[in-house]
Amino acid sequence: GLLLIIPFVAFWNRSWMGAGDSKLIGVCGFYLNVYGGLIMLAIFAGWLLISMAFMYFRQVDHRPRVPLAPLISLSAAITVLIYYIPYS
């Protein structure tokens, strides 16, 4: 699960996301394990694409700053509800 953080550290070094976002993904990956972490990342990518589409249709001229921590937290909560609750 912690191996999921490695690509996001590269995003953090390029200033594409903050250090807190990378750490939050690492903690969620540690808690959710590998399969749950991959499900969480797929849900997060969907939320991110939807938010970027809304930014595109609003036609923001400057580079938009999307708050990633709420999207990551929501993705982790949905993953826990889908992946872990039915099996317990």
Image (cartoon, helix red, strand yellow):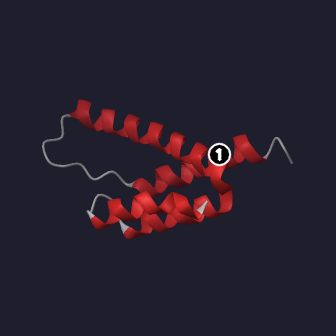
Residue density around tag 1, few if under 14, some if 14–19, many if 20 or more, within 10 Å: many
Side of 83 relative to 9 (left or right): right
- Residue most toward the left? 61
Side of 71 relative to 1 (left or right): left
Looking at the rendered structure, the kind of residue marked 1 is Thr
Above or below, 80 against 86 in this view is below
Q: Quadrant of the N terminus?
A: bottom right
- Which residue shows up at 50% across the image and 53% down it? 72
- Which residue shows up at 79% across the image and 46% down it? 85
Residue 79 appears at what percent x and percent y?
65, 45
Q: Secondary structure at mark 1?
A: helix
- Please state the total of marks drawn on the protein image: 1
Residue 50: quadrant of the picture: top left
Residue 62 appears at what percent x and percent y?
14, 48
- Which residue shows up at 35% across the image and 62% down it? 10
Front residue of 63/40: it is 40
Residue 25 appears at what percent x and percent y?
51, 60
- Residue most toward the right? 88
Above or below, 61 against 8 in this view is above
Residue 35 appears at what percent x and percent y?
65, 47
Front residue of 57/42: it is 42
- Which residue shows up at 13% across the image and 42% down it? 61
Give the residue number, with chain letter if any, for mark 1: 79
